[in-house]
Amino acid sequence: MILNISAVLLFGAASAFAVKTKSAGGGAALVLFLFGFFSAGTGAYEPIHNLVQASADAIAQLGK
């Protein structure tokens, strides 16, 4: 079973959780950065998207 979820939805939910729990660590900062990045779609979209996609593919391959 494959679950597809939008990166904006995923990082939006994670950033809402980080703000609600008042997380101030590096992980929360990364989540908030990625949410802003994916929602804005800036010129740096392609390299960062490729990095996130490669990371997701690598994690998916660990389960096989």
Image (tube, rainbow, N blue to C red):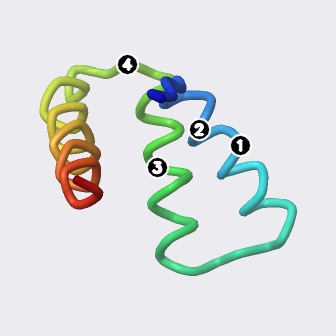
Kindly report the distance in space between the C-alpha atoms of the residues bearing marks 4 and 3: 12 Å
- Dot 2 and dot 3 residues touching (CB under 8 Å): no
The kind of residue tagged 3 is: Phe
Residue 46 relative to residue 22: left or right: left
Q: Label 4 belongs to which residue? A: 41
What element does badge 3 sit on?
A: helix
Q: Residue furthest bottom?
A: 25
Residue 60, image x and y in percent?
Answer: 27, 48
Kindly report the distance in space between the C-alpha atoms of the residues bearing marks 1 and 3: 13 Å
What element does badge 2 sit on?
A: helix
What element does badge 1 sit on?
A: helix
Q: Label 2 belongs to which residue? A: 10
Kindly report the distance in space between the C-alpha atoms of the residues bearing marks 2 and 1: 5 Å
Kindly report the distance in space between the C-alpha atoms of the residues bearing marks 1 and 4: 18 Å
Mark nearer the N terminus (4 vs 3): 3
The residue sitting at 77% across, 49% down in the picture is 16
- Dot 1 and dot 3 residues touching (CB under 8 Å): no
Q: Which mark is residue 13?
A: 1
